[in-house]
Structures are given as structure tokens and as C-alpha cells.
Image: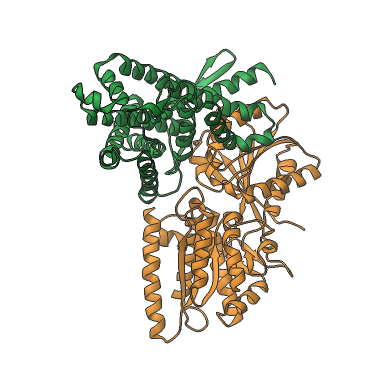
Amino acid sequence: MTLPYLIDQLVNGLILGSMYALVAIGFSMIYGIVRLINFAHGDILTIGAFAGLAAFASADLPFPVVILIVLVAGAVVGMVIERTTFRPMRGSPQVTGFIASLAVSIILENLAIMILSAQPRTFRIPAYLNALVDFGPVSIRVIDLMIVVLAIVLVIALTSFVRFTKVGIAMRATAENYDVARLMGININRMIMLAFAIGSALAAVAGLMWGSKYGQISPLMGVLPGLKAFVAAVIGGVGSISGAVLGGYILGLAEVLFVGLLPPALSGYRNAFVFGALILVLLVLPNGLLGRNTETRA
Amino acid sequence: MQTWIKGLASAAVGALIAASAGSAQAADPIDIVALYNLSGGGQASLDVPSLNGVKLKAKMINEAGGLLGGRMLNVTAFDTKDDTREAATAAKRAVAMKGVSAAIGFSDTTYVLAAAPLFQTAGIPFVTSGATSPDLPVMVGDEMFLVPFGDDVQAEAMAEYAYNKLGIHKIAIWTDRGMDYTTGLTKYFTKRFEKLGGKVVLSDVFMTSDQDFSALVSRLKSTKGVEGVYAASGPDTAGIIIKQIREAGLDLPIMGGDGLDTDLVVSVPGKEMATDVYFTTHAYVGLDTGPANEFRKAYTREYGHEPENAFAALGFDAMGVVANAIEKAGSADPAAVTKALAATKDYEGVTGALTYPEGSHVPSKPVAIMHVDKGNVDFDETVTPQD
């Protein structure tokens, strides 16, 4: 093993981790505010990818506009799911929402198969996004660079939004305690819907990035990344935004290094490794790296 | 999607017409079941054309007056949704139907293994149009027939082509460990390649659901002396593998089996990067024979576009071989059909002449080697296995 090889693999892990982080943030945010493990979150990634495909195919829109369209599409779908499925269940035991999210996930996947067909589709992006940028020993594609930069920018924007703006503070108050937040004049419904909108928009944008990077999308593409984002969120501590980001990067790097540093014969076990890590984290650090004890909520 | 819904709808209508016409003539239709993954995953890109081929052949036979003196073929299709449990369920439902003469289906060994044993138990022949494991008849039993060549034949053909024609002596092999088909390809390829004097310098594995191959590409890049890659991949990962290898700046020849016979191989990496790719597939593209040309014309007329890949032709041939056996047997009784199938000799199919050698249910058939160059998929040569 040589140094360039190691750098190569670290870059691979960073890119993969950025996409996991984007999905994991939304996952964590939604959990933080409604205590819902939303298994339909990965399917929003699929919707984002297909929205991106449609935006590219219907008009030759510039990439930033496509990103905007995908963000909006993800947010709208997230809000619709919240309004139609999860709001009527608010106040029910946690497991009700969890099972409902599985149902939503399966409905979305089957709808996608019926409407879009199961055949994988090609996802083409403008040529300039595929150009190579040199950084000394490694060269990176523009799209890969964009994935990393976009992940970091969105994370910083979101963190400052939640920490410093009035709406962000209201969201955190809602996450803390519905009743007290309501007494403070906060519209709980609006806050929860906002969390779904932001979380889903991020997952959708991750889907766009996923499609742009790998060039192929299909109705079930979101399943595995969705599950892995769940693992990332657990590693970081479910409910914590910075934890989700950290978990995403740790998972991306660990997965790539697992394949890259161990004998090739073990490459096939990468998913087993990821979910084995999940069990380990749950045993050793049940609240994740940056998570708080979330069971004490009023 | 829309085309296959239309296809299913027209099949249903066709079945109704065939059924009513049959009763009018007081001749019962001959029931054939077809099991394919029509929705859910990359298998659909092989299975949808396959079923199109099956239905086209049945339609042509019916239009020409049916079999056994006017009995119409009635094809009932089951969508097994890329799920082995669905495959087993569909097989159970098909076996429970009364009077099924034969079953046709699948482009992948894993699904055949889920469904065919149920037909074996019921004594109904199962003819796979696209699954290529030569061990299938051994694993399932005497009701199991293959229409395509076995994986041993196509993997050995590519090993010889790589070593002799492309001059590759040091190779890296990527294997999808999630499929019987791909692990089989690697086994046979490695054996023949090493026997020729070649060396496998890197053997890496992945799973069907993988999309990120960056770690494998980096390892490939850092492995010294690699002259080419044999990618034992199914259709789901075929395009992404080529894209990611090329994006890393590696211009090595990439080779594979008939799992690469999908348009994703060109569309996903794009024309520029879909180059220097070679794969083995079922010889029909290169065959300028009467049946092959006739098939291309009939398929285009029926579905409005050229056959997507060789699997359309294989489905067409699977139905043809079964119909041929029914005629030869003079009966639609499954036991008689099985016996006649085993005796198939020189059936002039679209994918070449098909004969089951004495005691074998895997045909000896020619293999086509395809060359992808700047997005153009061209026929290179046909190899007929000697042993």
C-alpha cells in the first residue's frame, strides 16, 4: 500500500460520506423534532433523483436551477407525507409512526416502479461537471467536488439557521417540549412541517448528487443509502445535526477503507460490515457520539 | 413500462380471443406459462424483451394456424418482480393451473432455481430462455432445459479471445458475489485463462446492490501489470462499472458475459467512455440467416422498435423449441413434451441451430463476441465451442 493509494481511498470515502451526511441530517432532524424513525426517508432520495432527471430532460436548465427544483420537489413531498400520514398519528406510540413510515416507503417504491418502470435509467449531466480538477497527487471530478462542497455548505447553513434564527430557535424549542413551545406561541404544526421540508429537501438533493455521480438511477436506488444514512445518524447520535454529519463521514470513510485496506475477498461484505457496525454502536454507545439521552422527553 | 403494460394488455386480449376461437373450433388451447421479472431491478431490461419474444413467437404460430391441427397457444405471463420468493409463488400458482404443457422463463440462474424445482416435482418441463448455468439440469432435474449456451462456454470463449486475440496475459477479475451466474462465469473464465498461461493478478468482489465502486477502482489502479478487466456482472452494475473505471482514467479493455448485453453499457458511461468493451452474447446479431432476419423484422413490426438485445431472440427461440417439441410429440401432455424436448435436434432458431447432445439439456450453440467502440456495439466474431 502506498500513500497515493491511501489518499485516493480517503477521497473516495469523503465523497461517499458527504452523500450519507446529506441524507442522515434529514433523518436526524425529523427524529429530533417528532421522535420518528422515518424509513421513507431513503425514498425521498429516489424522488430527488428522478425530479433531477425530469428537470434535465425537459429543459436544458443550468445545474444550480436543477438543484433548486430538486430541493423544492423534496420539500413538497416531505410536507405532503407529513400532513397526510404522520400528523394524524401524532400522539400515538412511537412504534405507530415507525410502522407507518415503512408503509409509506413501500407505497412510494411500488408507485415508482409502476409509474417509472423498474428498468434502471441513465442519468446524464452536463460535460463540464465531469471535467477533472487537479490537486497535486489526486485529481477529482467537478461533480465530486461539488458533492463535498454542497454538503459542507448546506450543513453550515442549516446549523446556523437552527442555532441563530428565530425560526430555528422555535424549532429547537418544539423538539424540546411541544407543550411549553406551544405556550410560547410557537405554531408546532408549522415547525414540524418545516423539519420535514428541510430534511426531505436535503435527501432529495443527495439523490440528485447520487444520480449525477453514478450515472444510473432506479426506483429502488434510495433503499440502501437510506438505511446507511440511518446507520450514520445512529453513529452520530440520532437527533443531532452535527452528529449526523459526523456519522455520515465516519461511515463513508469506514466503508471505503474496509473495502480498500482489507483483502479483496472481503469486499463483498461491505454492507454486512456497515450493519454490523450499527449493532456495535447500539451496544457500546446507544446514544451515538454526539447524541443526548433522548428518552427523558416530557 | 408503457410498452409492457400494453404488451400485457394485448396478451390478455389475445388470450381471450385465442380462448374463444379455441372453443369455437372445439379445440382446447395449449397452455404455456411464462415467468419473468418484469418490474423491479435490472433483470427487467433482459426479461421484458424475453417475454416480448415469447409472445411474438406464440402469436406467429397462432396466426399460422396453431399447433396439433388448430390448437392455439395460450401464454400466461407471471411478473416475479426481481424477487425469488415471488418466483416460487408464481411457480406454485402456475403448477396449480390445470393442463399446463410447459413453462418458459428467466434470464438468471438464481430465479430459475427458485421456480423450476416446483415444475420438476409436477412433471412439467421448464425451459429457461436466458439463464446460463450449465449445472441447472443437474440441480433441478430432467424437466430442466436451457435455450442459451452454458456459462462455461461463454466464459471460456471470452478467456480465449482475451488471451489470443486481445493479447491480455495479466487480468483483473471483478465478480458479483450475489449471483450464481456471475460466480459461475468467474470460475470458468479463470480456469480456462490460467490453462492458456494467463495470470489473474487481482480478484475483487462486489454485490449486486453496490453502486459505489470507487474503492475497487482505486485498488485496480494501484495494481501493477493489469492488462484488462473481466467484469462478471449482471445488467444492474454493468454500466456503472464501466463508467467508474473509465472516469478514473483507466483505459484498459473491459470484458464480460451476456450480463453486459444491455443498453446501460453504453448509456450510463456515455459514448466517449463506452469504448474498448467486449462481451459474449447469444449469436444472433452476427447471424445473417433467414430466421434471424425474419425475427428482426417481425419484432420491429410488433413492438415498434428493433429487438433490445439478444434476450428477445432467446425468448422467441424458447417458445419455438417448446412448440417444435409439442408438434414432434403430437401431444400437449407435459411428459410427452419433455421427451420430445430432450430429442431436439438441429432446431433452426434465431440464436443459431439448437441440438441437445445425448443425455444433456444444455445445447451446444455458437457464442457471439461483441465489441463496444465509442458507444457503437458491433458484432466481432462467432466462436463455436469445440468440446
Q: Nearer the viewer, residue B20 or A250?
A: A250
User: In this view of the protein, can residue A220 be seen by the observer?
Assistant: yes
Q: Give the chain coloured orange.
A: B
Q: Residue at x 64, y 17 (%)?
A: A4
How many numbered dots are placed on residues in this image? 0
Q: Nearer the viewer, residue B293 or B159?
A: B159
> Residue B26 placed where, x, y %?
42, 87
> Residue B230 placed where, x, y %?
66, 40
Q: Nearer the viewer, residue A212 or A168?
A: A168
Vertical arrangement, residue A115 with respect to residue A261, above or below: below
> Residue B253 placed where, x, y %?
64, 36
- Quarter of the image for the C terminus of chain B: give it: bottom right
Q: Residue furthest bottom?
A: B26
Q: Give the chain coloured green.
A: A
**In the image, is B159 to the left or to the right of A149?**
right
Vertical arrangement, residue A110 with respect to residue A183, above or below: below
- Quarter of the rendering containing residue A169: top left
